[in-house]
Amino acid sequence: MPSLAIGLSLAGLPAGAVPATATPSLTSRPMTAYEHQRPAWGTCPESQKELNAAGAECAKVTVPLDYSVPGGPTLRIAVSRVKARSKADRRGILLSNPGGPGGSGLANTLALRPALKQVADHYDLIGFDPRFLGESSPLTCAPAPPPTPPGPSTSAREDFEASVRAARDTARRCREHGDNAALLPHASSRNVARDMDVIRAALGERKLSYYGVSYGADLGAVYTQMFPRRTDRMVIDSSTDPAATQYELFQRSGEPAEEALDEWAAWTARRHDTYRLGRTAAQVRAGVQGLLDQAERRPVTVGGHRLGAPVLRMLLKQPVQHAENDPALAAIVRDLADAAAGKPVEPGPELATMLELLASPGLADSMVGGAIFMCGDGGWPSGGWPKDPETYWKNSVRSRATQPVFGPYVNGMIAPCAFWAGEPREAGTVIGNDVPVLMLQARHDNNVPYDGALALHRRLTGSRLITADIRSHGVYGRELDGHRPVPCADRAVNDYLRTGTLPAHDLTCARAEAAR
């Protein structure tokens, strides 16, 4: 869901293609042939070091490109398996998705094993790369031209026009490359859910259990609607309002992001002797705003990079998602403020890491991977983008009054979908059944706001909601990312996966459980 992928058409950033390419094969088979196939397990790709070290097996599962024409072209979905250690008490299969959209997940379920603890022993841990990504019949776009850095002077409108040009170019490069015109209409969340069900059937399982975070959480909810009788133990972490479009979800993240920045500013002000950014929260906020105002006229040069205001907003938005990142964000702002003042700056490790990420080809790959699903979905969870560029500009300008730092970012970031040829083949998924689901959400998530999870919770009438009173995107297994765990949330997930019994009522994990 809203994440770094929001910058996929950002002017001055690379906009490359997803790795490798493949052309679907032609077949003449009914759906039962897909359901009764048996994967040929073998070693995993050499690049999957963690899977191979864990003794995992990998295989390809064949799925239809178009589920309405099962005898037509096919795709090959990469699947990994780490078998359950406890054969006598084996529960079944546990799939997962790491989010995005556009995130590959071949090793993702294995990565959850430390958080799952003994529960992992009772499941075959199944990872998979969604269609068109990673090892799953990957789709490419034509190579992007080298990124053009902003000039020595600019304006907010010039920055916006540059992002429009980049979005239009990405749409053109993706549509016109190879066989993409025939493939792209089949990149959708509903088709990924169908692929998940083919994986389930190919593995000989009556039902599947699942953990998904962010977009992966919404994908899990999609599966519960399409395959309610095949859903076993479903855990979704950090989900969104099913009545909103993806663009609306981005817009809604602006207000909580400003609130998070207020919290960070107060934290930083208490440490003025360290960061020298202001003795009050208001002074710290004013310094950040001054930095952005200056960058909208004269981009900031630091570490060999010239950074305009859109990039600076993105650099602020990423770390502010987690309270544990407050020191890193303060260090980044200190470096940027010095650079904007004309001082010689050697970027600290926090800013250097971000600058390296901005220049990495992998960033472009993940952004385009997200675009193909955001443009292929006909609505929730990841579709629904205005076609008129002026819509983004007007909303960006309007947002500045109440969301001066992040409003222009979340409202004005135009996606390639505005210029995507053709329309999605299916409408978005409508939520409304009583399949048992365990939901988790951070109350102060400024990526996917808490109100959205409440809206989904109301629609999933068989669900229970675990609320963590923290600023975070993602609740379960936070220690896997070096963050402070929320023990009561981790226990609730593992208890549910072990017993199949949801909590009797919704729960709140106090902030003290993940206190700084």
Image (cartoon, grey):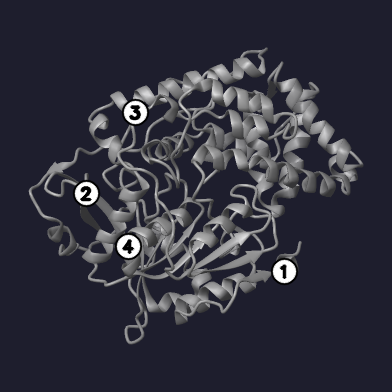
Residue for badge 4 = 227
Does the residue at mark 2 contact the one at mark 3 (Cβ under 8 Å)? no
Kind of residue indicated by mark 4:
Phe
Which badge, 1 or 2, comes first in the chain's sequence?
Answer: 2
Kind of residue indicated by mark 3:
Cys
Report the residue at 46% width, 82% height from top: 499
Residue for badge 3 = 174
Residue 113 location (% of width, % of height): 47, 69
Q: Nearer the viewer, residue 513 or 410?
A: 410
Residue 387 location (% of width, % of height): 45, 26
Which badge, 1 or 4, comes first in the chain's sequence?
Answer: 4
Element class at badge 1: loop
Does the residue at mark 3 contact the one at mark 4 (Cβ under 8 Å)? no
In space, the residues marked 1 and 4 are separated at their CA atoms by: 34 Å
Answer few, some or many: residues within 10 Å of disc 3's Cα (few below 14, many 20 plus, some between 14 and 19): many
Q: Which mark is residue 510?
A: 1
Does the residue at mark 2 contact the one at mark 4 (Cβ under 8 Å)? no
Up-down: is 251 above or below 233?
Answer: above
Kind of residue indicated by mark 2:
Tyr
Front of the two marks 1 and 3: 1
Kind of residue indicated by mark 1:
Ala
Answer few, some or many: residues within 10 Å of disc 1's Cα (few below 14, many 20 plus, some between 14 and 19): some
Q: Is residue 403 visible?
A: yes
Q: Which mark is residue 67?
A: 2
In space, the residues marked 1 and 3 are separated at their CA atoms by: 46 Å
Q: Nearer the viewer, residue 346 or 6?
A: 6
Answer few, some or many: residues within 10 Å of disc 4's Cα (few below 14, many 20 plus, some between 14 and 19): some
Answer few, some or many: residues within 10 Å of disc 2's Cα (few below 14, many 20 plus, some between 14 and 19): some
Which badge, 2 or 4, comes first in the chain's sequence?
Answer: 2
Furthest toward the bottom, the residue is 88
In space, the residues marked 3 and 4 are separated at their CA atoms by: 31 Å
Looking at the image, residue 74 sits to the left or right of residue 164; the answer is left
